[in-house]
Image (tube, helix red, strand yellow):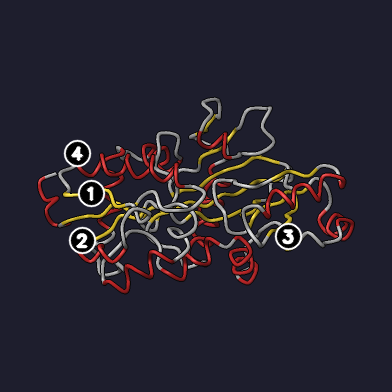
């Protein structure tokens, strides 16, 4: 790409100090190599190793920090303060998107379908929660990604242990109604929903967990996703509305389920999705003709437009 000089000096933000550091290092390295292959003057920048004030020496930033500190508005705020344009969602949308409860509240207020939930603590009455949500249910830390700290609870006796596991990762924990059905992910790039991907974890996995996301090679990814044309269009439109409702922009991913009655339910939004060999964004982009390198350049180009941060 001959005109890569228009980007100037680019910091690829990776690593960081969240529970998803290792995944971020993998994602960031892949993005960095793609940009360098495309002729971009890009360098790795790990905020755990360097002061973010040094970002003032760069023309723009490609954010590949997953989890807290990178996906929750903190680094976005620092870049705003330093006047450095960056990829993806702004401060407010990042902060909402990282908080699963706030995301749900925005979606509920926008009349978008999302599974019923309750905020829980170690002192919550398991019977009350089960009466409200039924069994099985899923316990999730509110501010972690990559399915970290999640448990499926099938018996009321397992409730306390699941909460203990989740609270190791987050002071705020939620219980969510378990939706039996098929899981899908919808990648959003530059205001468009890309072809829907169906996720099919192997039978021995209770849900699409951290190991399935990053370490196993037996998860099946369906493109085409198996939905009818009308259903796929419905899910794409729903996902775009959900993405915009939380204030997300540029690129990202919506996770959703279809229950056995055929209804769609929104699970969460990822404003800095993975970009590793296992990741879903490159898979969806490939289905519409993007190579990995082209995808990375297209995301970086978001920092050149008038709508950039």
Apparent side of residue 139 relative to residue 213 in the rendered image (left or right): right
Q: How many marks?
A: 4
For mark 3, give the secondary structure: strand
| Cβ atoms under marks 4 and 2 closer than 8 Å | no
Mark 2 and mark 1 lie on one chain; the one further toward the N terminus is: 1
| Cβ atoms under marks 3 and 2 closer than 8 Å | no
Residue that label 1 marks: 43
**Inter-mark Cα distance, 1 to 4:** 12 Å
Query: Callout 1: 10 Å neighbours few (<14), some, many (20+)?
Result: some
Quadrant where the N terminus sits is top left
- On the image, the x and y values in percent for residue 102 come to 60, 67
**Inter-mark Cα distance, 2 to 1:** 10 Å
Query: Callout 2: 10 Å neighbours few (<14), some, many (20+)?
Result: some
- The residue under the point 25% across, 56% down is 301
Residue that label 2 marks: 58
Residue that label 3 marks: 117
Mark 4 and mark 2 lie on one chain; the one further toward the N terminus is: 4
Query: Callout 4: 10 Å neighbours few (<14), some, many (20+)?
Result: few
| Cβ atoms under marks 2 and 1 closer than 8 Å | yes
């Amino acid at each position: 790409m001959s005109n890569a000089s228009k980007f100037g000096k680019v910091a690829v933000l990776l690593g960081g100090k969240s529970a998803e550091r290792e995944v971020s290092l993998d994602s960031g390295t892949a993005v960095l190599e793609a940009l360098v292959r495309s002729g971009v003057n890009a360098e790795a920048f790990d905020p755990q190793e360097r002061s973010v004030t040094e970002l003032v020496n760069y023309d723009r930033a490609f954010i590949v920090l997953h989890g807290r500190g990178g996906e929750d508005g903190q680094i976005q705020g620092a870049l705003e303060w330093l006047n450095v344009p960056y990829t993806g969602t702004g401060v407010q949308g990042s902060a909402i998107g990282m908080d699963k409860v706030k995301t749900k509240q925005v979606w509920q207020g926008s009349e978008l379908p999302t599974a019923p939930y309750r905020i829980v603590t170690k002192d919550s009455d398991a019977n009350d929660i089960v009466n409200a949500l039924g069994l099985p249910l899923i316990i999730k830390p509110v501010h972690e990604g990559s399915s970290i700290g999640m448990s499926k609870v099938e018996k009321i006796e397992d409730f306390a242990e699941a909460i203990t596991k989740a609270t190791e990762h987050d002071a705020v924990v939620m219980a969510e109604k378990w939706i039996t059905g098929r899981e899908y992910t919808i990648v959003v790039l530059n205001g468009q929903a890309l072809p829907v991907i169906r996720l099919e974890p192997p039978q021995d996995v209770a849900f699409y967990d951290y190991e399935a996301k990053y370490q196993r090679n037996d998860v099946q990814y369906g493109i085409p996703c198996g939905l009818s044309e009308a259903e796929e269009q419905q899910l794409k439109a729903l996902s775009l509305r959900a993405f915009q409702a939380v204030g997300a922009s540029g690129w990202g991913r919506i996770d959703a389920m279809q229950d056995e009655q055929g209804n769609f339910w929104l699970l969460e939004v990822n404003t800095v999705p993975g970009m590793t060999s296992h990741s879903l964004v490159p898979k969806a982009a490939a289905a519409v003709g993007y190579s990995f390198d082209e995808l990375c350049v297209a995301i970086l180009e978001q920092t050149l437009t008038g709508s950039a941060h």
